[in-house]
Image (spheres, rainbow, N blue to C red):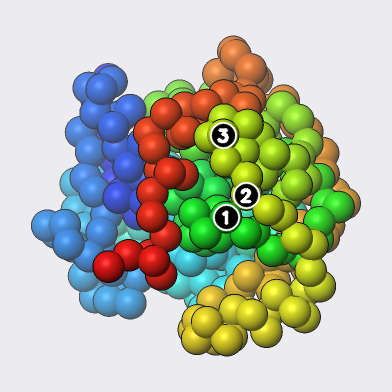
Amino acid sequence: MKNNILVLGGTGKTGRKVVEQLTNRGQKVRVGSRNATPSFDWNVPANWPAAFQGIDKIYITFQPDLAVPGALEAIELLTKEAHKAGIKKLVLLSGKGEREAELCEQVVIHSGIDYTIVRASWFNQNFSESFFLDPILAGHVALPQAQAKVPYVDTDDIAAVVVETLLDDQHNGEIYELTGPRLLTFEDVIQEINKATERNIVFTPISLDAYSKMLKEFQLPADYVWLITYLFTEVIGNEKNSLVTHDIEKVLGRKAKDFSTYVQETAATGVWSSIPKNQRA
């Protein structure tokens, strides 16, 4: 059976993989982004009905994170518009251990629409596609919460779970918590990348205050600094998030991708051998 599925954030870390996997399985997919036609922009709700027209199911990702101010109101409005449009299923990507994200989950749960909640641990790809990449390229990674152990999860696995929850009604009403198969500290991560790339990236533990100050000195936006501080305090610093789950195996019938597999695959692309932005001509 073919579904018409809207993938919000369809060019992002998980969204683009969800689009690819759904397309490979013969589903009709609409990419939800500002540059798509019809476009979807979280800041332009007047355009949402056009994006929802003819759609059966929606995969919801919110940028930069469900914890940020304004996210709850946006999710509330989205579920109302989805209900009006006759959407049959919502799958929400949420953060594991984020209280603010859980408030957004409750909105989806009580929307009157079938749903699945997918709570993900920190992504493996944060080290190759996001805010940790430049320090790795520079050869010096300084981060707080050095002793925290995180069960990093791969976006390939997240996307595969999302696709299953979109296509199989047996997942309706479920909340899945996705993690990788083992816990790693930041130093563990850097050691694995060093081994795969034959580099000597240095890891230095620092305080959260020092890290926040460093981000501000790099003139990063205040809301970005707030989010990173929140994540290091509430998520990385939360012992409940240092638990390995088996929901990926439960949904997919196979084990989650190990971090070392991700590192080997990523090292082969050469992304960690590139020249840092601040050293480019």
Q: Is residue 186 above or below residue 276?
A: above
Asked if one can make out residue 236 in the rendered structure from this viewpoint, the answer is yes
Mark 2 and mark 3: Cα distance apart in space: 9 Å
Q: Amino acid at mark 2?
A: Ile
- Mark 1 highlights which residue? 139
Quadrant for the N terminus in the image: top left
Q: Amino acid at mark 3?
A: Glu
- Mark 2 highlights which residue? 201
Q: Is residue 84 left or right of residue 276?
A: left
Residue at image location 42% in from the left, 29% down from the top: 268
- The answer to whether the residue labelled 3 contacts the one labelled 1, judged by CB atoms less than 8 Å apart, is no
Label 1 sits on a secondary structure element that is loop
- The answer to whether the residue labelled 1 contacts the one labelled 2, judged by CB atoms less than 8 Å apart, is yes
- Counting residues from the start of the chain, the first of labels 1 and 2 encountered is 1
Residue at image location 78% in from the left, 36% down from the top: 183
Quadrant for the C terminus in the image: bottom left
The one of 272 and 83 positioned closer to us in this rendering: 272
Mark 3 and mark 1: Cα distance apart in space: 12 Å
- Mark 3 highlights which residue? 198
